[in-house]
Image: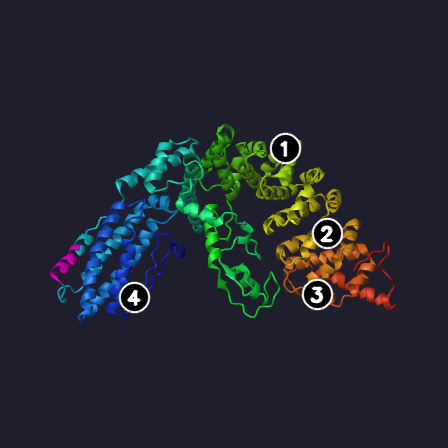
């Protein structure tokens, strides 16, 4: 059997990488393959085509007629008939045409590409015309008269040749009307005019985009096309305008998420009660794209664990167990759950993140974005509860895609409305509003509006952090505090709010939160220390962060990312005498040395460990250096850091090595003391 490349993910749309059968192929193999691919082509008959419906119908009729011919040829082969070389050459050419037809039909029914294929209906028509006429060209060399085929089969061959030779495939009239409507609507967008909703609905119905999720798929496809078009400014501008059209249609016309059908209800049952952190790779902390299992039973994303092995590690990152085999087994069940979860939440599994555009590539897209934001802002103020929920979902989706969308939503007054409904008694509304605030906190103007003139917005967010109805809401609040704390004044205000830091520590400490939530809280605490260190470090210390972090690092069930974040905070705390004492008294020096000596930690973790140890030595004096020098493994670990070019803390490692050498030399009486003994601390 001949295997052909299929699947839209392996090629650009409207490109047809067909494979020529080899010259030595047998007639039996060739005919069987033709029948299979013809069956694939005919399976498209019940599907919806957004353009060139008449050409599709004619093409399928030709293929159906040729199936009869192929079946008769196969019958002749079974009774021992021989076929000349010209017959094989003709059928081989036909096989290539059929491959291309199959690709073309895939593209015309491809999820997410309905609007794109409509706009490119002229190009689609050209492909149908060329490929249909190629059928006639292939059959021209078929030796009909020299073969002993039934008369009605020969007549069928001549009929197909005659019909395909004169093919005049062209866009349908309805296609042209729909295209005219799209360009007219784009023109209205350019002039900041809201188009007629009935006109948009006619276009959407024509191309088969009838649900909110359909629009999500259209947006995803257009994004991929924009990223693939590098220097074609005209095409990028058109695609950007189509993006504005479909986003406006999703938000304003189709009005939010769909009612679940039966299939989606089954998927809801599958993922009900699921902790999304269970779907994240323990190494990358991203939702896994290709989950695989090690012999220890732990699951990782294939790309992450492959990099782990290629770095020379032969252990399980979670357990530290040395592996007898590095064979990776696909975790099919987890992959199915991930696909269901991502489908329901409109998440793209591809982790190659595209750089979000600051401004759209066309005036139509820009103005459509502003109109969409104004509509959503109005729904939050004037809509009923269900309209509000749908608007909140749109805010989450739009604010996550690009800085331009965030800017439009902020300027439309969405932030003020979101802050008012954060205290809603409806957990759905609170969670979605908090998620929207999180995304809009990445916008400079959004930060200002969230905080407010008197900092009242921060108090509301801290309230959600501690008392939110859902843990997701509390997690989003922690992440929002991180983005807001990047501004020095806001960092000070956050620190001054009662329970702000203790709320973050509670998330880090709690078993109810996964790695992602804990990291959100950790980086928020770290940001508070960096941007307002003199005022916040004692608040962090009073909140009990040191023992919490040390216990966390001692745990074997956390990811390297959490270890790195924890060590970074401890290193920052050790810059101050009270923080240094707290870390030392709880065994922080010994733990840091142990982590530094591990072969399984990342360069970032190694760097933070070195900084922590250095700060403890500088502030703790000779007592700490002396305790450190007693550990026989420390010098080897520090020299490993020096040889690791990725670590980025070679100078600090050198400083520690120098301290230890000088301490040992003083101990033997060869040099004068240089380290003071201002305080006495139990370091080990």
Judge whether 188 appears above or below 630 on screen. above
Q: Residue beneath label 4, please?
A: 21
Looking at the image, is mark 2 or mark 3 earlier in the sequence? 2
Rendered location of residue 479, percent (x, y) = 61, 44
Looking at the image, is mark 4 or mark 1 earlier in the sequence? 4
Q: Residue beneath label 3, please?
A: 637
Q: Do the residues labelled 4 and 1 touch (CB within 8 Å)?
A: no
Residue under the image location 85 percent in, 56 percent down: 680
Judge whether 168 appears above or below 316 on screen. above
Looking at the image, is mark 2 or mark 1 earlier in the sequence? 1
Q: Is residue 565 magenta?
A: no
Q: Give the range drawn in magenta.
A: 150-159
Q: Residue beneath label 1, please?
A: 452
Q: Are marks 2 and 4 in contact (CB under 8 Å)?
A: no
Looking at the image, is mark 4 or mark 3 earlier in the sequence? 4
Say whether residue 310 is left or right of residue 90: right
Residue under the image location 19 percent in, 59 percent down: 68
Label the magenta part by its dominant secondary structure: helix
Could you give the CA–CA distance between mark 1 and mark 3, rounded to whole angstroms? 49 Å
Q: Residue beneath label 2, please?
A: 547
Residue under the image location 73 percent in, 47 percent down: 544
Classed neighbour count for the residue bearing mark 3: other residues with Cα under 10 Å, few (<14), some (14–19), many (≥20): many
Rendered location of residue 179, percent (x, y) = 33, 39
Quarter-of-image position of residue 244? top left
Determine the secondary structure under disc 3.
helix
The quadrant in which the N terminus is found is bottom left
Classed neighbour count for the residue bearing mark 2: other residues with Cα under 10 Å, few (<14), some (14–19), many (≥20): some
Could you give the CA–CA distance between mark 2 and mark 1, rounded to whole angstroms? 35 Å
Camera-nearest label, 4 or 3: 3
Quarter-of-image position of residue 321? bottom right
Judge whether 352 appears above or below 260 on screen. below
């Amino acid at each position: 059997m001949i295997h052909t490349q299929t699947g839209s993910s392996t090629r650009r749309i409207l490109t047809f990488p067909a494979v020529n059968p080899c010259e030595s192929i047998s007639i039996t193999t060739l005919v069987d393959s033709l029948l299979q691919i013809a069956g694939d082509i005919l399976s498209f008959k019940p599907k919806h085509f957004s353009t060139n419906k008449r050409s599709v119908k004619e093409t399928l009729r030709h293929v159906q007629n040729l199936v009869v011919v192929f079946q008769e040829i196969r019958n002749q082969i079974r009774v021992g008939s021989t076929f000349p070389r010209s017959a094989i050459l003709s059928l081989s050419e036909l096989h290539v045409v059929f491959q291309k037809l199959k690709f073309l039909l895939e593209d015309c029914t491809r999820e997410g590409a309905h609007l794109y294929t409509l706009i490119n209906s002229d190009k689609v028509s050209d492909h149908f015309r060329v490929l249909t006429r190629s059928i006639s060209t292939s059959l021209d060399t078929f030796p009909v008269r020299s073969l002993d085929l039934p008369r009605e089969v020969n007549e069928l061959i001549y009929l197909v040749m005659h019909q395909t030779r004169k093919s005049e495939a062209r866009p349908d009239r309805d296609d042209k009307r729909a295209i005219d409507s799209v360009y007219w609507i784009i023109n209205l967008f350019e002039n900041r005019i809201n188009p007629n909703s009935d006109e948009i609905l006619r276009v959407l119905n024509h191309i088969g985009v009838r649900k909110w999720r359909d629009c999500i798929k259209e947006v995803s496809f257009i994004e991929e096309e924009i990223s693939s078009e590098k220097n074609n400014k005209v095409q990028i501008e058109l695609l950007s305008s189509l993006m504005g059209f479909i986003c406006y249609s999703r938000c304003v016309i189709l009005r939010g998420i769909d009612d679940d059908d039966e299939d989606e209800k089954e998927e809801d049952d599958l993922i009900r009660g699921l902790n999304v952190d269970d779907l994240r790779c323990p190494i990358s902390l991203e939702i896994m794209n290709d989950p695989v299992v090690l012999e220890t039973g732990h699951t990782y994303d294939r790309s992450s664990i492959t990099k782990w092995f290629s770095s020379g590690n032969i252990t399980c990152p979670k357990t530290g167990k040395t592996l007898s085999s590095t064979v990776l087994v696909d975790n099919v069940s987890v992959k199915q759950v991930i696909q269901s979860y991502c489908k329901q939440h409109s998440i793209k599994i591809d982790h190659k993140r595209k750089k979000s555009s600051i401004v759209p590539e066309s005036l139509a897209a820009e103005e459509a974005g502003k109109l969409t934001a104004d509509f959503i802002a109005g729904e939050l103020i004037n809509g009923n509860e269900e309209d509000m929920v749908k608007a909140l979902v749109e805010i989450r989706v739009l604010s996550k895609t690009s800085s331009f969308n965030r800017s439009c939503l902020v300027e439309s007054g969405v932030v003020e409305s979101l802050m008012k409904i954060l205290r809603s008694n409806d957990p759905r509304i609170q969670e979605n509003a908090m998620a929207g605030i999180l995304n809009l906190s990445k916008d400079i103007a959004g930060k200002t509006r969230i905080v407010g003139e008197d900092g009242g917005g921060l108090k509301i967010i801290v309230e959600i952090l501690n008392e939110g109805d859902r843990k997701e809401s509390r997690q989003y609040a922690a992440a929002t505090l991180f983005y807001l704390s990047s501004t020095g004044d806001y960092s000070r205000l956050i620190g001054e709010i009662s329970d702000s830091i203790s709320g973050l520590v509670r998330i880090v400490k709690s078993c109810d939160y996964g790695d992602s939530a804990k990291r959100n809280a950790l980086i928020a605490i770290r940001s508070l220390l960096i941007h307002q260190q003199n005022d916040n470090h004692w608040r962090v210390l009073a909140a009990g962060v040191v023992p919490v972090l040390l216990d966390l690092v001692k745990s074997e069930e956390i990811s390297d990312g959490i270890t790195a974040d924890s060590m970074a905070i401890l290193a920052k705390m050790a810059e101050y005498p009270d923080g240094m004492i707290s870390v030392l008294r709880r065994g922080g020096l010994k733990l840091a040395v142990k982590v530094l000596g591990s072969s399984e930690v990342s360069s970032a973790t190694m760097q933070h460990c070195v900084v922590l140890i250095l700060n403890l030595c500088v502030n703790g004096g000779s007592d700490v250096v002396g305790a450190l020098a007693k550990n026989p493994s420390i010098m080897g670990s520090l020299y490993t850091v020096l040889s690791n070019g990725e670590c980025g803390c070679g100078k600090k490692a050198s400083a520690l090595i120098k301290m230890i050498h000088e301490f040992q030399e003083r101990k033997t009486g060869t040099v004068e003391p240089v380290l003071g003994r201002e305080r006495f601390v139990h370091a080990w």
